[in-house]
Amino acid sequence: MSAPVALTSPVAGDSAAPTPSRFWDRRAARYAKKPVPDEAAYERTLERVRAYLRPGDSVVELGCGTGTTALKLAASAGAILATDYSAEMIALATEKARRAGVTNVQFRRCTLDDAALGERSCDVLMAMNLLHLLPAIPEQLRRIRALVRPGGLFISKTPCIGDQGLAVRLAIPVLRAVGAAPYVSFVTERSLTADIAGAGFAVQETGMYPLKSRSFFVVARREST
């Protein structure tokens, strides 16, 4: 299960919001102990991701949290670089990999614009439970596209908050005001599909896992140019 960790700086002028790193550092240990909310939906997501991975693929995961997803997919890829903004999340993930004896997954604390993430450096880039926590999603998607090799894949799953009930959308600003929630974009299935296409990806597959939380799964291929 990937942690919903923002990989960019807080929104300009939004001084009430905790920084992404501090917010998730403080919650890392507790988050690591939480069970997956919907095990069947999570396994379905992993199944669909594995269908697109090849043994020699170079994979980057953004917002890896405590590393569960990267480690579960390790046997299906050549090498995985799993990144997160939170140092505490990365520490927990690294220890989890050590205990599991997984050697083809590297965990690194960095942001989306970090120089360590080179252009056209991966065959597959994953962002699970992340995009709704990033400001300026179209801009972030263009940066993501730059990291993927021509013909490579972008795989994401995003809670579409804008498609959820009014109560959820009203509660989020209140939670943020008291430091109990990070920045959240009210992304919708329609807006996200358009933004992914606008960034230069061709959508290959979509799904909703789980349906009740409107978690929108997308596989998109970077155009060859």
Image (cartoon, helix red, strand yellow):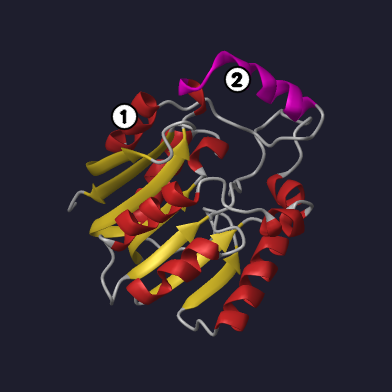
Give left or right: position of 154 versus 43: left
* Residue 145 spot, x, y in % from top left: 34, 50
Give left or right: position of 197 versus 125: left
* Residue 11 spot, x, y in % from top left: 65, 33
What residue is rendered at 74% in x and 29% in y?
176
Q: Amino acid at mark 1?
A: Ala
Furthest residue toward front:
40
Q: Is residue 212 magenta?
A: no
* Residue 175 spot, x, y in % from top left: 74, 27
What residue is rendered at 31% in x and 63% in y?
50
Residue 200 vertical position relative to residue 119 in the rendered view, above or below: above
Residue 19 vertical position relative to residue 169 in the rendered view, above or below: below
Pointer 2 or 1: first along the chain? 2
- Which residue is disc 2 drawn over? 169
Give left or right: position of 112 versus 181: left
Q: Pointer 2: residues within 10 angstroms few (<14), some, or many (20+)?
A: some
Answer yes or no: is residue 51 visible. Answer: yes
Answer yes or no: is residue 200 visible. Answer: no
What residue is rendered at 59% in x and 52% in y?
3
Q: Amino acid at mark 2?
A: Arg
Labels 2 and 1 touching (C-beta < 8 A): no
Q: Nearer the viewer, mark 2 or mark 1?
A: 2
Secondary-structure class at tag 2: helix
Furthest residue toward left:
224
Q: Pointer 1: residues within 10 angstroms few (<14), some, or many (20+)?
A: some
Magenta-drawn segment:
163-177
Towards the viewer: 67 or 220 = 67
* Residue 164 spot, x, y in % from top left: 50, 22
What residue is rendered at 68% in x and 37% in y?
182
Towards the viewer: 3 or 210 = 210
- Which residue is disc 1 drawn over? 194
Give left or right: position of 129 versus 24: left
